[in-house]
Image: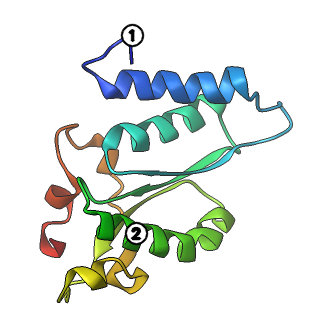
Amino acid sequence: KNMSPGDPFVWKHAAFKHLLTKERRIAADEYLNLVAFGDQMPEIDAAHRIVELLGLPSRAKTIKLRDQPTVGEIIGQLRRAEAELPGLVAEGASGEFAMVPQSSWSSGASRAAAAGWSLTRAPSSMRAIKRSMSVTSMFPLFF
């Protein structure tokens, strides 16, 4: 954070790079199968950038969580992510996904349930969208 305190993209990239190239080196005959979760775009972007740096066959699967979630929403999203994790790990290619609320939320309780969320493949241009855009802007029909 000290190198560029106003730009989380810079320090997230630096943190991922340090962690995965200095702290925990990936041997030339190995690859990284990274699954990253984040409610902001810097985490998502950093995961894909480190995989690009490492090269194939490394891959990143990222899950964009809802911006500024409530505690119940965090719980529901993580429950859905836990259910989806085996499939994401097994996926043979990099991919971008977004956690999207089901349209029929009737109470805060349903937001804390895995059934209150679905994992949707994100548009291929998700990372190219302006840094200031939120998942609400990317999936307006779901919020």
At x 33% / y 13%, what residue is drawn?
Answer: 4
At x 31% / y 50%, what residue is drawn?
Answer: 125
Instruction: Specify whether residue 121 is in view.
Output: no
Q: Amino acid at mark 2?
A: Ile
Which residue is at the far right? 29
* In the image, residue 62 above or below residue 121: above
Residue 5 image position (x, y, % from top left): 30, 17
Mark 2: few/some/many CA within 10 Å (<14, 14-19, 20+): some
Q: Nearer the viewer, mark 1 or mark 2?
A: 2
Helix or strand or loop: what does disc 1 sit on? loop
Please identify the quarter of the rendering in which residue 117 is found.
bottom left
Helix or strand or loop: what does disc 2 sit on? helix
Horizontally, residue 15 falls left or right of residue 140, namely right
Which residue is at the far top? 3
Badge number at residue 94:
none
Pointer 1 residue? 3
At x 83% / y 31%, what residue is drawn?
Answer: 27
Q: Amino acid at mark 1?
A: Met
- Split into 4 quadrants, where in the image is the N terminus? top left
Instruction: Specify whether residue 122 is in view.
Output: yes
Residue 67 image position (x, y, % from top left): 24, 54
At x 40% / y 69%, what residue is drawn?
Answer: 75
Count the marks: how many? Answer: 2
C-alpha separation, residue under disc 1 versus residue under disc 2: 33 Å
Residue 8 image position (x, y, % from top left): 33, 27
Pointer 2 residue? 75
In front here: 104 or 129?
A: 104
Please identify the quarter of the rendering in which residue 143 is found.
bottom left
